[in-house]
Image: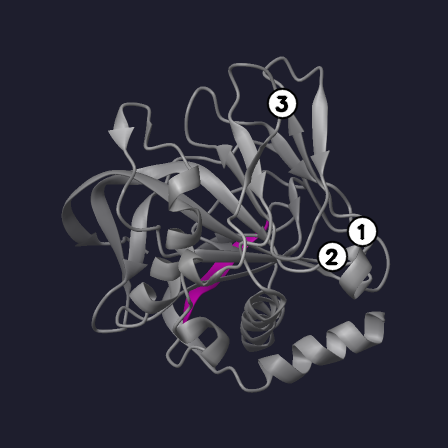
Amino acid sequence: MPGTYQSHIASLAASISPRVLATTRGSGNYGESGKASFHTIDKLPPALADLPGDACRSAPLQRHEIDLGPDRLAFYIDDVLTEREADTLAACAEAILQHNGHSRLAPGINTPPGMRVNMAAHWYPPHASAAGFLGPLFDRFRHLVPTSLGGLPLHEHLSQKIAHFKYGDGDRFMQHVDGLFPGQGANARGDGVESWAGVSSGMSILLFLNDGPTDGLSGGETRLWSADAQRHVDVTPRKGRALFFRRGSTDAVLHAGMPVSGPVPKYMALINLAYGERTGTQALAV
């Protein structure tokens, strides 16, 4: 199974052609820093180019609450992605990692030495294609997320950065909370990133792209802690599952990516659920 899954993802990745969208600084796994890049994929794979919305599903999606106490918000939704869509997203990550030399420098973020130990592939869908990909994806679960957070209304669009992390044998992400980021997207010229004034990240969405029963993944649970850090809940990777939790606030959820073991890597994608009203657009400083 391990070889079969990796061969399948590599085969899908072979037809995906990423390119650098913007160059910036990035931080690595052990305190190193250096040049890192945001990518784009000018021609999205067919499985992602025109996603069907929630209406195509035979059964409605359901929100499953995660009990971390009354002052911490977290839940998951299964089957947000189909198997084909999850494999294609994993292949996007693999294609970018092949392009960036399997970089462990994550662009535009700064983590302490030893906190994040994994590979990073961050990208934005093209300006003209983002609505056909992320719009239907958002429609699948829009009715299941909070309509407001921190006094801000749910934004009409998902933030468009897709932050892939690939975990090899022994890779992990230590305890941390996710910070506050503005809404973002690729610009219309296809040569940079735009920041959306008035819009910021309210929740993280972790999309699990592979799992144990289907692909042979071992480990890689996401561990979430209560406010006093005395109790935790582990969320097992399941292909197509989306895990939501509060970020960028005083009630942000402390969490960690548990170590992966064995030959099958863990693929996941992080997208920000955005809140606020867009008041302008400016080039993201890189």
| Number of marks present in the image shown | 3
> In x, y percent, where is residue 241?
61, 50
Work out which quarter of the rendered image holds the N terminus and state it: bottom right
Q: Residue furthest bottom?
A: 15
> In x, y percent, where is residue 266?
71, 57
Specify the label residue 246 is tagged with: none
User: Of residues 253 and 75, which is closer to you in this image?
Assistant: 75
User: Of residues 281 and 5, which is closer to you in this image?
Assistant: 5
Specify the label residue 211 is tagged with: 2
Q: Which residues are magenta?
A: 32-40
Q: Dot 3, crowdedness within 10 Å: few (<14), some or many (≥20)?
A: some
Question: Is residue 174 visible in this depiction of the protein?
Answer: no
Residue at (38% x, 60% y) in the render: 136
> In x, y percent, where is residue 12?
61, 81
Drawn side of residue 285 relative to residue 279, left or right: right
Drawn side of residue 263 relative to residue 174, left or right: right
Q: Is the residue under label 1 in contact with that under label 2 (CB below 8 Å)?
A: no
- Mark 3 — residue? 67
Q: Secondary structure at mark 2?
A: loop
Which kind of residue does numbered mark 3 sit on? Asp
Which kind of residue does numbered mark 2 sit on? Asp
Q: Secondary structure at mark 1?
A: loop
From the viewer's perspective, is residue 241 above or below residue 180? below
Report the Cα–Cα distance between label 2 and label 1: 16 Å
Residue at (44% x, 20% y) in the render: 250
Q: Secondary structure at mark 3?
A: loop
The disc, 3 or 2, on the residue closer to the chain's N-terminal end is 3
Question: Is residue 37 visible in this depiction of the protein?
Answer: yes
Which kind of residue does numbered mark 1 sit on? Gly
